Every structure is written in C-alpha cells, then in structure tokens.
Amino acid sequence: MKSNSRLMRRVIAAVGGLGLAVSVSACGSSGTTAAAGGDGEGGGKLNYWTQQDPTDPVLQAAVDSFNAADDADVELQAFASNGYKDKVRAAMGSSEMPGMFFNWGGGSLDDYTSAGLLVDLGEAVQANPELESSFLPSVLEIGKVDGTLVGVPMRGTQPVFIFYNKQVLADAGIEPPATYADLEAAVATLSDQGVTPFAVAGNADSGWTELMWVSYLVDRIGGPEVFERIRSGDASGWQDPAVLQAAEEIRSLVDSGAFGTNFQSVSYGSGGTSTLLSSGKAAMQLMGSWEYATQVADSPEFAAEGLGWVPFPAYEGGKGDPANVVGNPSNYISVTTSADRATAFDFLETTYSEEYVQGLVDAGEVPVTTNAEELLASAPNPDYAQFQYDLVADAPAFTQSWDQALGLDIGTPLITEIQKLFNGQSTPEQFVSAASALQ
Amino acid sequence: MRTRPNYAAGALTALWLLVISVPLSAVVVTAFKPQAGYIEDGPLSLPSALTLDNVVTVLSGDFPRYVANTLLVTLMTVAVVVALAVPVGYAVVRGQTWLTSGVFRLFLLGLAIPSQAVVIPLFLLINRLGLYDSLWAVALPTAAFALPVSVLVLSGAMRDISNELYEAMALDGAGPSRVLMTLVVPLSKSGIATIGVFAALQAWNGFLFPLIFTQSTSSKLVTTGLYDYVAQYGANVPALMAAVMLSAVPILLVYLFARRALVAGLMGVGGK
Amino acid sequence: MVSQLTAPAKSDVTPQQPPRTRRRVAPSVGRPGVVWAVPGLVFFALFAIVPMLGVAYLSLTDWNGLGSPQFIGLDNWRRFADDPQIVQAVVLTLVLLAGNVAVQLPVSVLLGVWAAGHQRNRAVLSAIFFLPLLLSTAATAIMWRQLLDPNFGVPAQLAGVFGGDGNFVGTSRGAMIALVVVTSWQFVPFHSLLFQGAARAIPHTLYQAAMIDGAGRVRSFFSITLPQLKNTLVTSGTLMVVGGLTAFDVVLVLTNGGPGTDTTILPFRMYREAFQTYDYGYGSAIALLLLVVATVVSLLLTRLSGYDKMQSTQEGV
C-alpha cells in the first residue's frame, strides 16, 4: 500500500496544480490570444460574418466578385438573427474572431473598441479618401466611436415609420394618421371594428419593437436632446418630463386597446406581427423599413398592392420636430485585428461600388451612399425607396435605435423595463426610476 | 381475485391519453399541411391537403448534418462516461480506504452542481483547450456532468455482486484488473446499460452546452438547430413542425429496435 | 444464488460494510486502490469542480469577456441587495420547482402503478405514453410554443369558441402554468417508467395478505404501494428537483423570462447577465447563488427522506 499512497500523493499534487493553472490562465488571456491571431501575416481566409437576411445574396455577390477580381479568399457566413450578437460576442473573446463583421455601429461597438479589437479605419480612409466621401456624413458619423472610425456603412438606411394595411383602413373609413390626435381617433374607430389598431410584438424576445414607440414619443415630446443626454452618460436625462409623459402616453395607448389585448404573446415578423398586418387582423405597425422586405418574402401580393406607409405623426405641443426620424442609420462592417488588413481594406471598397449599391437598391434597400439617389428609380418599388430617402435626407435629426446606441449592458435591461411598462407591470413613474437606475 | 373495473383509473388514463396524443398528432398533422392553410385554420383543424413539401424542405437543408452531429456527440459522451464511470464505481465499491469513500461522497455532492452554474468558466476552459465550436466541446462537459448519477447507479449495481465471488477470485490470485474485467463488468451489465442510456439521453437533449460552446453550422446539433429554425421559418409553421417531428425519428428507431433495452435502462435509473 | 447474481437490481439493498469476520485471504488482495478512480475523478474535477472554483473567483471580479477580469471584491454580492429581481428570481425558481413536483409526482406514481399491471391494453397505451420521451426538451418547447401562439395556435382557435383573446403565454400566470405543463408533459413519461419498474417489483404476497385482511384498492395503495415505492419516490423527487433547478431550455424557448421578468428564474437570470448583457462577474455571483440554493434544497431533501441511510424495503418480507 505504501507505493499506492506515494502514487496518490503525486497524483493529487498533479491534479491540484493542473486545475489551478488552468483556471487562472483561462480567465485572463483569451482576449490576447485572439489579438495575437493574425496581423496582416499569411492572408489566408478572411471570414465575414453577417446576420441572416433577405439581402444576403447581395453581400454574397460582392464577395464572389471580389474574390475573383483580387484572387482573395473572403468567406461570408450568415447566422440566424436570434443570437447573432451573442455569437459575435463569444467569438470576439476567442480565437474564432471573424475578420470582418456586420454590426449596428454606435454603442454596439463601444466594448470592442475599448478592448482594442477593432481596426481604426481612419488608415483606410487616408489611403483611399473615397471611402469617406462616398457616404452621407450623418450616417458615417454613427460608424465612429469616440471620434475613431471603426465601421463603414454597408446597408441601406432603416428609418422607422408606420406601415398600414390599405384595405383595413379603407374599410374603417379613415386616413393614415398625420397627427397624434388622428392616431388616437383611429385607435378608437378600429377597436370598434374588432381590428387590432397597431400590431406590436410584446413577447419577451421582441421587446425592441416596443422600444420604437418609446423612442418616437420621447423624441416628439422632448426633442432629440433628451436621448442625447442619456446616450452621453447623463442619467438625469431620464428625469426629463418628456420621458414620463411618453410613458404615460404608452399607458393610455395600451389601456385604450391600441395594441390589442394579446400582444404580450406575439412575436415579430413572419408568423407574428407582419402576418397580422398582411392578413388584416391588424391595421398598422410601427416598424423599421426592413418590414417591406419581410412582407415581400411572406406575402408578395399584399406587399405589392395592399401595403402603405406614412411617417410617425406629429405630436401637438411637442418640442421635437415632426420630421425627426428614429431607426438604424445603417448597418456597418468593421474590421478586427485578426484580419489581413490589406485585403480587408480593399474589400471595404465594395461597399460603395456601383454593383453593390445597385444590388442593394434592387433588394429594396435605400443605400446611404452619395450615388444612391440616382439609382433609386430602378428600385423594385421606387416610391417606397424615394419615400425613405426623402424622409432621411430631410430629417433634422436621426436618432439611432436606443438599444444599439446605449450598448448591451444598458440596452438589454432597458428593454425589459419597457416591456414591464407595456405589460402594466410597472407604472410610468416606476419605469422612469427603473430606467435611471440602470446607468 | 375479483377485480371491479377501476373507473377512476380508466378515466384518468383516458385523460392522459388525450393530453399526450393531441399535441403529438397536431405536430404530425401540421407537418404535412401546406403552409398557406395553417395561418387560416390553426393547429387543431384537419388538413385540406397533404404535402411532403415541408419534410423535403427540412431534409434538404442542414438538418441531416445536425442529426449526424448529435449522433456523434451522443456516442462520444457515452463512450467517455462508461470508460470513466466503471473504474470509479469499482473503486468506490471494492476499495477499502478512506480515499475511496471520500471519492464516493464527492460524486454524491457533485449531483447537486447545476451545469448552468459553471457554464461561464467552462466556456473559458473550452476556449483555452482550443475546443470551441467542436463536437468535443459539447461531449466532454456533458459526460462530466453525467458522471455523478452514473457513479451512483454503477455503485448500486456493483454492490449486488456477492462477496463470495470476489473472495473466490482473490483466492485465485486475481489482481484488481482481472477482477474488474472478468467478474464485475459482466455482472453489472444492466447497470452499464442504464448509465449508457442516461448519458445518451443527456447528450441527445443537451441544449445549453451546444448553445454556448458551438456556433457554426458544421458543429450544430439538432436542439440548437431547431431553435434556429424558429427564427428562420417564421410563419412557415408546418416546416417547423416537420423539423420537430423529424428530430424524434432517431430515438424512435432506437425505441422500435431496442425497446426492451431502452426501457430497462431507464427503469434502472430509479432501481437503486 | 445464480438468480441473485443475474437479476437486475430490483430492490434497494443496504450498502454492505465488509463483514468483520476473520478472512482467509489478506483483505487488500485483489482490491482496487483509489488509483482506479483517478481518471474519472480528474475528469470530473476538471470539468465540474475547477469551474466551480472559477465561478467563485469570477464572482469577485468585473469582466465583460474582452480583456482581463478586474478584481472588485464583494461588489457583485452587494449588488444583490439593490436588485429586487434577484429575490423574485429565487422565489420564481422555487415556485416553478414546487409546481413541477406537485404535478409530476402524483401523476407519475399513478401512471407507473397502473402501467405495472398486466392487462393487455396497458402495453399498447404504455407505448403511446412513452412517446414524449422521444422529443428533446428543445423540440418539446418549440412544439408547445407554436401550439400556444396567441394568434395562430390553440388558444386562438379556442378563443373563437370560448371567447377570450388567446393571450396565454403572455400573462404572468399563464407563462408559469405553461412552463409547468410543458415540463410535466415531457418528464412524466420518464418518471412513470421509474415507478413502473419499482411497482412491478412489489411482491404480490403483500397485496394478497392485505386482501385477506379486507383492505380495498385505495387502502392497499396507500398502505402497501406507496411505502414500497419510497426509495423510488426519493430518487424521482431528487431528479425532479435537480432538473427543476436547472430548467433553462424551456424558459428560453417558451417565455424568454417574460412577461417582463415573471418567469425569469435564477438559471435564466444568470444566462441573461452573463451571455446577453456580458456581465460575467455578476452572472457568476448569480451562478454561485444558484449553487447555494441547489445544495440547500438537496440537503433538505436527503435529510427529510433519510435517503442517505438507504434502508431496504424488503425487510420483514
């Protein structure tokens, strides 16, 4: 037994040592492992991650022609949208970090920038000034974090506005609302008809749809400065009376049946709010411009004939300009430190190339490049494209959707608080204090 | 023995039969409905037409790969669990030192560790070992967390082997390895089958580990694949239901061909 | 003696201490040393115990996954005091657990005992009752998610008949009920199998003796069947508790913690903090809390049921 116990002692020491070593090293260095991955050496494959989306074929075409022309090996990988952000996040801490990836700019890139994982695209601009001059300045701004350019727009702009079912409104004998008073009247009329006035996705996955209502109301009532304060870290921005008033308006909308009674179980999109709209069970939906593509994929006849759109109404007595817009200025492509910088910078040029922009236009997007306006006439729905372009070009202020602007650590709990407001689990006052406690 | 018909039992089992069969038949029926009809009619209505389109849609996508991956992970998990738990069970039952009973108590305590609680450091460990996004990233932790129950079950099974047999082998001068291979393993076959089934079910059902430790399509499993389909198929509920139905097919095959073993294995979990 | 060797484990036997009689052979010959347990032990330590220590360490840090963790002492733990949702999460976890056990245990016992009988139709029905086990938790949750859809699922269809608006999973109570229903639907077949196996092993002599004494069906169920099933009840209950404390998949797929935070149980809250908000430090503190709750519940369970004493149910037969 003596040899056994000596062996035992050695084994225990080995296990203990191994365990300790592994746990300590596991915690600290995953970030640096990734950074050391590749810094221009040995090009190899350049991974380009994006979210699954009807515009993926346009990206794929750009990748294919780039690979052919430059003899490169860029690979596009599209991931299901629920969990795309998580996947990117998880990979950013590991050796699986993609070379380029699709993101929402603004606050969503804060963490990555402070961890030093993103390449400063200012260098790319210096080498190629067209990279900067080809985009609408206000949109390019959102690709910057603390003044450093880390993302280049690669999609159309996505303002949020009201979509409506022409037939349902015609049957109810009302026009799409131009003022908030019109909106409240429409709610009353439509509820009487047994139609849900506004489809909203209230289930726990889709709280961002409710966020849009809050964003617009705060903007209309108090102007874009209110959110600007919040975004720059001033938590007292939440105490602005506009926020409380917006929350109270939400309360009365819910109570008056504007969203129907079962919205807490409804999800966004195909099989949820979009189908409610196209099937006539709901009259209107406040949604981003990608809703059109969803409708085209889901119910093409409805998208072609029966779908209408109108900007968010003006709020009587509000400080915000009724022409202000909320939404996603664009989506951006960023380059990480694991990419072969030369190839990546070359690839960025595709984002404003005529073929790419044309491809986006054909897919129903409204690109934010300076050459976009001429191409809009060839869009599948030129009226729709022109509507969006004018909306964005004429907007004095374009506020980025709050969860993207604030970053995940505030954005995610904020959406939960908004959901509680909609569900009646919090009063407007409770919502305001909960929201300010988040920062 | 005179037996009055048990009306209460009859009524309850009829009720349970409804509870089980209605959702399952809704799934199967919906899987064969064309997409257009579903939105209008809802899940409980009879189909106006039947189509194989949904099954084709699912099978022509990445679904077969998900099934293959899951089968692989299941095999890997079972192999690791059996290879590790059998010697531990043996040591715990036949060993006489304070160390071996300490090991037993450690595994008993390990029963209480919820796998979610340690997922964060596990994630780091998997990264560090370079296993992120591989099938081993799922199999190894799943096997580890199946060990406590396996040790428990195996120790129960091995305890049943009578002392006289051990002593007879000892008289023969057999060392522990020979005793293990020629006596213990054959006689605890049912216990080994039980832990095999248990480990296989853990691997087949696993969701959190694949969700966190893998992300590309080439290493996706059926469970996480189904979750993706929810977003991907949207209103195409019949296709989603077809995927759900097809995900049950592998176990259904096992059930049909190895029913006794499967059921006996499951029953054995509670036996000790 | 042959039958004793080969019969599958069917009754609970006291773990035997080696008899303290004189042995003819040196006691350690042929016995495995602890070395045999080392591979399994190392593996388990690496994947379960070391991560637990890691969780304890991380709970004292602030870390978002990029860069290195910053040590902040007990700040994460102090945050619990300011976070009312944590208390809600613990309560919800226990409520869900209680609901699951309260539904699954009686139903499984009844079904298992019934299925242990020998009537012919029972075999066919048992096969049907087994079917939910073929679906993974994710598949089951997805199936129910569609079935409970407020506009296109069963509540909507029923709403046409019974009135109401089809909102079920979106209500606080409905969401909890849905979680219990889905989990029970999936696991009752498993637990009833356990009871079926155990019930088959109950010696008929006991029932015959009871009949002679004039005991009816109900009486013999409570006086004979249940006590004989005691060890299985404990095993099943333990598995239900462990499963209930870690029920995460169902919550993610079915309710995503909603409405609001009304089904945000502790494991889900941890997932949200760590993997959706990327606050690994706070998420680890929550994970440790979960561990504490799980350990307390398990200890209570084993103490209350005397599991660790592992008595035989065959005594006196």
Image: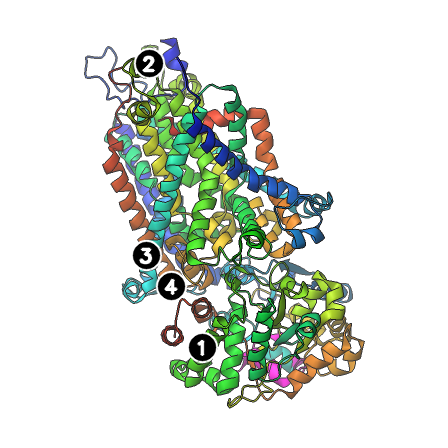
Disc 1 marks a residue whose amino acid type is: Ala
* Mark 3 on the same chain as mark 4: yes
Q: Residues within 10 Å of mark 4 (few under 14, many from 20)?
A: some
The one of B266 and A335 positioned closer to us in this rendering: B266
Disc 2 marks a residue whose amino acid type is: Gln
Q: Does A377 sit above or below residue C107?
A: below
The one of A198 and B244 positioned closer to us in this rendering: A198
Quadrant of the image for the N terminus of chain B? top left
Q: CA distance from mark 3 to mark 4?
A: 10 Å
Residue picked out by circle 4? C69
Residue A247 circle label? 1
Pointer 3 with pointer 4, Cβ within 8 A: no
Quadrant hosting residue C286:
bottom left
Residue picked out by circle 2? C208
Q: Residue at x 64, y 66 (%)?
A: A277
Q: Residue at x 65, y 78 (%)?
A: A174
Closer to the camera: disc 1 or disc 3? 1
- Label 4, secondary structure: give it: loop
Disc 4 marks a residue whose amino acid type is: Pro
Residue A165 shown in magenta: no
* Mark 3 on the same chain as mark 2: yes
